[in-house]
Image: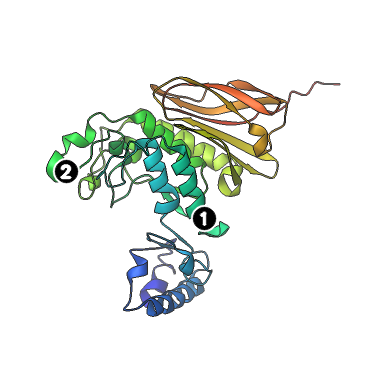
Amino acid sequence: MDIGRKWVSPPYNVDGWRLDVAADLGFSNEYNHIFWKRFRKEVKDANPDAIILAEHYGDPQDWLQGDEWDSVMNYDAFMEPLTWFLTGMEKHSDEYRPDLCGNADNFVGAMRHFMASMLTPSLQMAMNELSNHDHSRFLTRTNHKAGRVAQLGTEAAEKDVNKAILREAVIMQMTWIGAPTIYYGDEAGLCGFTDPDNRRTFPWGNEDKELQAFHKEVIRIHKEEKPLKKGSIKLLASDENLLAYGRFEAGEQIVVVVNNSDELRTVTVPVWYAGVEMEGRMKRLIYSYENGYTTEYDEYIVQDGEIVLNMGSHSAIVLKPAEALRLMP
């Protein structure tokens, strides 16, 4: 308890605690809850703004009643469903499931089920990661190679990767409910199988500059657009390898469309479900496609509450309503 208080207090003032396998502490479930209730009281007394974030697999409801943890590392309601949908890979790269790759029904069902186990404040601050120190790098998962470094070697983690799929994932990470958290090196194109290969040193001097620039743009959008912080979320469309969803708050809307297939496809999205006006225009904030990305300005017509998009293979787009032109009197 003294340690819990010390580091969130002056002169250290750290922002909070990430608790490793927090549900496993203690000799009994009863003691575990007693401990974390006391820990929360000590930490919050020292620094009311300090976050208490737990690593947890499974249902966290018992710990998220407002008197123990604030939120969790979001495996069940983010990393796992997103990884299965975009790559078909298990998060350690131990298994490839082609039946789950592009399976929008599985993604939507998993998200709805596991998001429902958290109250809104915990969900909004859940740690949404694509990779971390325990699992394979997301970019490596895009190559569909099942195995670990001991069997496959380090070079296999870098072969046949698909950066366009990683960019899809980053756009979803920065626009889905939760707190996007980047594992160092992901933004620079670092690869690796699960622990210990995922802990490679940062590629100083060999960073993927385009990928870094892309991350900065999507982070900027996340910071600037109000609905992406605390806005509601609504599924707008789903199909094999296709997702469209809206984020909205206080009269502002963001629409995200992801085409995870190898094919060009024309997509009709009912944006009015997210509160977009029935007639008007939407502007593009960013568009990622197979060979890169663009933030160049472009507009799309909203007619009868719907928008029609031509989505390239492995692409993702972020849109918002365009400001109406006002004529001078």
Residue 123 tag number: 1
Q: Look at the image and tell me in which quarter the N terminus lies.
A: bottom left
Q: CA distance from mark 2 to mark 1?
A: 34 Å
Q: Amino acid at mark 2?
A: Val
Residue most extreme to the right: 329
Of 230 and 278, the residue lying toward us: 278
Of 309 and 154, the residue lying toward us: 309
The 10 Å Cα crowd at callout 2, few under 14, some 14 to 19, many 20 or more, is some
From the top left corner, tell me how far across and down residue 173 is, in percent.
45, 42
From the top left corner, tell me how far across and down residue 45 is, in percent.
50, 74
SS at circle 2: helix
**Residue indicated by mark 2:** 149
The 10 Å Cα crowd at callout 1, few under 14, some 14 to 19, many 20 or more, is many
Q: Is residue 149 above or below residue 31?
A: above
Q: Amino acid at mark 1?
A: Leu
Q: Look at the image and tell me in which quarter the C terminus lies.
A: top right
